[in-house]
Image (cartoon, rainbow, N blue to C red):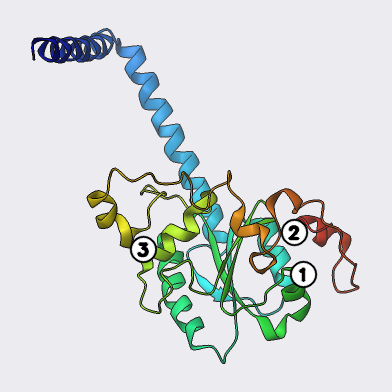
Amino acid sequence: MEAQQNNLLNVTEAIEKQVDAVIEQIDNLDTNDLEQLKQNRIKEMKKQEEKRKEWLSNDHGKYEELAEEKMFFDVIKKSENVVLHFYTNGSPRCAIVDKHLRILASKHIETRFAKLNAEKCPFLAEKLKIKTIPTIVLVQKSIMIDKVVGFSQLGNCDDFSTEVMEWRIAQNNILDYDGDLLTPPNLRDTKSKNSNKKIRSGIYNNDDDDDLENEEYGLPRDCAKSESIHRSTELTPEEAAELGID
């Protein structure tokens, strides 16, 4: 017991020293230092505002349908992060996806959200291996890095929340997400009750491509730039390169 008390005392003293050091740094700031901090903050705010204007000029903040598949390549050239929903009119689940993506589009203006009718873009659907409707394709820096196929990764039900979809899309930094990426929102209460159980790090992160190795889930990340495919007159070499399917 005495040893534990000594350890606690040592930790407390260490924290107090750290706090004292920070306070001392603040006290030692002169007028010039404070002015520099202010100018740096103003510069950062201006930079963020310029980025926001750029996003809005590229139709971020909206969830709209692309009129033709060629528009897809314009979108991924202009926007670093793109969420694209492949839908058909005959699938009621696509309407569920629409509802959630419309909410997320207005919340995450840093990412471009759009939809394409898979029946009207057979060439692109074939190249991206769209086999299940709905499928959400996630593109970063013109490379397809992930897919959300059907609802199996969203709780395998139709009444999942927007928060669950947001969490799933946020894997691989497609969205600015400040929540817990390891645990889906609908399972966080269970996690707290079973805190002793080991959780695999990064369910859908860059270190684990299990969900991309199966053909149903698309191109493996390490093959995205090197997989060889047959050319089509509907796609220029430049556009193929943009998508990473040279």
Q: Residue at x 35, y 77 (%)?
A: 159
Asked if the residues shown at circle 1 and circle 2 are in contact, with their CB atoms under 8 angstroms apart, the answer is yes
Q: Quadrant of residue 25?
A: top left
Residue 174 sits above or below residue 112 on the image: above
Q: Which residue is mark 2?
A: 243
Dot 3 alpha-carbon crowd within 10 angstroms: few under 14, some 14 to 19, many 20 or more = some
N-terminal label among 1 and 3? 1
Residue 209, x across and y down, in percent: 62, 51
Dot 2 alpha-carbon crowd within 10 angstroms: few under 14, some 14 to 19, many 20 or more = many
Which amino acid is tagged 1? Answer: Lys
- How far is the residue under mark 1 from the one under mark 3? 30 Å
- How far is the residue under mark 1 from the one under mark 2? 10 Å
Q: Which residue is mark 3?
A: 163
Which amino acid is tagged 2? Answer: Leu
- How far is the residue under mark 3 from the one under mark 2? 28 Å
Q: Nearer the viewer, residue 111 or 28?
A: 111
Front label number (1 vs 2): 1
Count of picture labels: 3
